[in-house]
Image: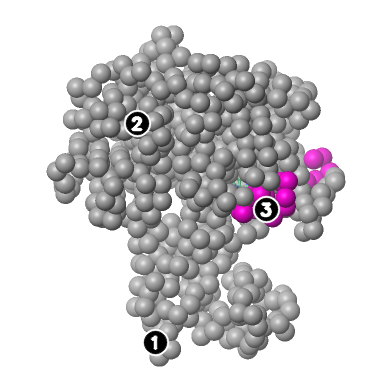
Amino acid sequence: MSEFPLHKVPDNFQDAHINAEQYREMYRRSIDDPAAFWAEQAEQFLTWDKRWDRVVEADFTQGKAEWFGGGKLNVSVNCIDRHLPARADQTAFIWEGDDPADSKHIAYAELKDAVCRLANALRERGVKKGDRVCIYMPMIPEAAYAMLACARIGAIHSVVFGGFSPEALKDRILDSDCRTVITADEGLRGGKRVPLKANTDAALAHCPNVHTCLVVRRTGGDIAWQEGRDTWYHEATEGASTDCEPESMDAEDPLFILYTSGSTGKPKGVLHTTAGYLLQSALTFKYTFDYREGEVYWCTADVGWVTGHTYIVYGPLANGAISLMFEGVPTYPDAGRCWEVVDKHQVATFYTAPTAIRALHAVGDEPVKRASRASLRLLGTVGEPINPEAWEWYYTVVGDSRCPIVDTWWQTETGAHMITPLPGATDLKPGSASFPVFGVNLALLNEDGSEIEGPGAGYLVVKSPWPSQIRSVYGDHQRLIDTYFSAYPGYYFTGDGASRDEDGYYWITGRVDDVLNVSGHRMGTAEVESALVLHDKIAEAAVVGFPHDIKGQGIYCYVTPMAGVEPSDELRKELIDLCVKEIGPIAKPDVIQWAPGLPKTRSGKIMRRILRKIAENELENLGDTSTLADPTVVDHLVENRAS
Ligand code: WTA
């Protein structure tokens, strides 16, 4: 499958937590007797207020799963208190600011104080168990404090990525009826200010239920203030106690909601619960990254995405690890920033997205070689398929051919890693996510739903429950069933295609639905289309992805203006701005092609397959166009293809 050589487990990983034999033995046990396997792990990884009564009860036809029913625990206690006093002075977070001169260490004892203060401040404002709290923050420690403070009092957090627009923020606040918002005056990324409070104000103009907006002072920039609703974070927490009684939560009580895009409709509020989520996060963090006591681990994701939740905050802290949080971007002040930070903080594990690797690869080796990177032991990727060329560069140049790469496949809905190499157990094939995590029971299906045995390619599905699986779509359980559990009854449908080779390695090929993956960010084509047709000069729009060297996929829009409207560069710019306003900068279209007509079947369905081929410039291979209502539409699109 790959012209690149197999990379054997290196010598310095021979004593890893899990070797090849242990992986095989534990994996087999986890599939043969999941209840016994996960009960053992739950004892080992978590601290319980009350032991569970039953390990797992699930019904995939109803999208239902209950893990550790009857058990009680608190996530913030598992991430903080139980590491005290032993780790009181050990760093929990290293924070590296946007400005290279700005960094600090937060010890576990300080983390406890900060989290308890905020938890008390929230309680004082009436926030209680089950209430939803929206967190719209830059990458500063207070973002993690906010998540953990919610967990402490049993409030459900909904983190919204700081790059989302006021419109997108408003939709998410309203969908889960968040009544408290935690934000900052401004964020700072690559030397530029991000107007978080101004965005929040614009969103909250349409959210009458929000009674409290806590504002962290990050830049000191000018902001508007609404008396009664707005409160400075530092003032609210200053006098608060550093002790806060944790809420003892049921294993299945919600921990957080995180919105993600699907192929239809508005983003869904993916709901995760307490024990199962934390368990799989903790276990995968320890084993995937072969985490060793005292090592510095750095995940470059934003806390606004699931990777930030599971692998900056919950997984590392549950293991008492040192997690580096970075406020800035990999190319500021220049393309050497990441490697400078690696040297500065002696980072052992570096975990990032293929899009960042491709962007840095494009700049060349010099910025990498300027740094020693001697502290690096392990590299990781997440979020999209990594092309073997980028993999090899990451391996040979960044890792000096001595650091294994863990290519981790998972989703917002899966909560934690599902397919990944383990550095002490797996010989690596560049571009393959390799093997399933313990307890993850995979299959590949043919179009007709039959399982593929042995090597082959098909739809990637999961056959049985796993602890960190999505529990519901907030406020709409039927949507969970329809989206994930109906296409192939009895299976969880991932939306991804994959192949399995003769050695059993999995190779993810990408989404098989109308979800784009732009720079590792998920986006529904329908979301971009809805934004485009908001323009009163636009009649119709169809959006597809196309291969993009750096971003993985770019956004290609076919747009039909209203009758009598002349397409113009000005209109094009208005449309681009509209997408940015409605969704955020990540939704900026790469190509807009004017389309007097779209290829439709006689029943009016848009033939996206053809639009994809044109966007990909695969013009010889457009397939059968005879079923179209008007086949000449395709000729026009091909002739006027935007290049
Ligand atoms: C894609 C991110 C290939 C996949 C954690 C999935 C990947 C979607 C990989 C989920 C990988 C994630 N190789 N593709 N290692 N990791 N994906 O919800 O298409 O933002 O369905 O979660 O990203 O994106 P999400």
Camera-near label (3 vs 1) is: 3
Which numbered tag is attached to residue 565? 1
First in sequence: mark 3 or mark 2?
2
| Residue at 66% from the left image edge and 29% from the top image edge | 56
With respect to residue 304, does 84 lie above or below?
A: above
Q: Which colouring convention does the figure follow?
A: one colour
With respect to residue 172, does 230 lie above or below?
A: above
Tell me where the magenta segment starts and ends, as one range: 482-504
With respect to residue 46, does 170 lie above or below?
A: below
Report if residue 503 lies within the magenta region.
Answer: yes
Measured as percent of width and height from the top left, residue 45 is found at 57, 19
First in sequence: mark 3 or mark 1?
3
User: What is the C-alpha distance between the residues marked 3 and 1?
Assistant: 42 Å
Q: How packed is label 3: few (under 14 Cα within 10 Å), some, or many (20 or more)?
A: some
Which numbered tag is attached to residue 50? none
Tag 3's secondary structure? loop
Which numbered tag is attached to residue 128? 2
| Residue at 74% from the left image edge and 24% from the top image edge | 26
The residue closer to the viewer here, 498 or 403, is 498
- Name the image quarter holding residue 600: bottom right
Which numbered tag is attached to residue 486? 3
First in sequence: mark 2 or mark 1?
2
Q: Which kind of residue does numbered mark 3 sit on?
A: Ser
Tag 1's secondary structure? loop
- Name the image quarter holding residue 467: top right
